[in-house]
Amino acid sequence: MSCQAISPGKNFFAGGFGGVCLVFAGHPLDTIKVRIQTMPVPGPGESPLYRGTFDCFKQTLAKEGFKGLYKGMAAPIIGVTPMFAVCFFGFGLGKKLQQKTPDDVLTYPQLFAAGMLSGVFTTAIMAPGERIKCLLQIQAAKGEVKYAGPMDCVKQLYKESGIRGIYRGTALTLMRDVPASGMYFMTYEWLKRILTPEGKSPNELSVPSVLFAGGMAGIFNWAVAIPPDVLKSRFQTAPEGKYPNGFRDVLRELLREEGVASLYKGFTAVMLRAFPANAACFLGFEMAMKFLNWAAPGL
């Protein structure tokens, strides 16, 4: 079985393209997920704003049209190319640092560690991008239009709270992305090895196999990431000063008012989105890598 030498540089460019594919495929359900996670707790005798994923989907279409599902997409599109580029670069670097020779096949714990490194790398871009995206996604649902767009959101956040306002939720983003990224990449590499026919290279997988491995990697990623993601969405969209002790206050409030199940709010939307979005991401990544290996074999 031939082994392609790891190139963090190629991972950088191919990962950026994969990230763009992910956003286009997955943003509508991400909007639904954030709206469900951040909807207010209904008072006595009141009905919840959304009865579930499909109700939120129907209400969004009825009130805002198809474009309502893509609210806030500009922020992740702007941030996603460098973010996924850095994410895949971090994974490639993490793998390369653990190899003694280019032919070394890494163990699954080593792949998990390389994936965790990618989560650390992406936080600087991910945290402000997530803050802006979440604020834009929920404002339409509330019937308010405070921010005209991503740049206006950044300007207002900076004016109100400085750089700390833009980076609010960074610790929670780390708590979500470091273990989830480890699971993400380890699962993808594990499934690639399982699906590779004997005598073939994992780099020669068919399109359906890549789609399946990428989609399942997304499922495993979000199985780990959902609880901290719920806390992050709540914290990043809360009014200034509501949670003075950070995520501990958010966790206590959620457990007190809604129980442990509240940590899995948006589960259906997340899982419906996870497979197609990450299947598209890894297919885009693998296609870009094949092009780069052909165009620049020595890079």
Image (tube, rainbow, N blue to C red):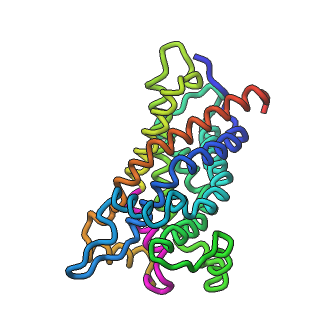
User: Would residue 94 be counted in the magenta stretch?
Assistant: no
Q: Residue at x 50, y 43 (%)?
A: 278
**The one of 233 and 170 positioned closer to us in this rendering:** 233
Q: Residue at x 61, y 47 (%)?
A: 19
The reply to whether residue 132 is in sight is yes
Q: Residue at x 31, y 76 (%)?
A: 41
The quadrant of the image that shows the C terminus is top right
The quadrant of the image that shows the N terminus is top right
- Residue 26's x, y, as percent? 50, 50
User: Would residue 241 be counted in the magenta stretch?
Assistant: yes
Identify the magenta region: 226-243
- Residue 70's x, y, as percent? 54, 58
- Residue 262's x, y, as percent? 30, 66
220 lies left or right of 72? left
Q: Main secondary structure of the magenta part?
A: helix
- Residue 229's x, y, as percent? 43, 62
In the figure, residue 40 lies in which quadrant?
bottom left
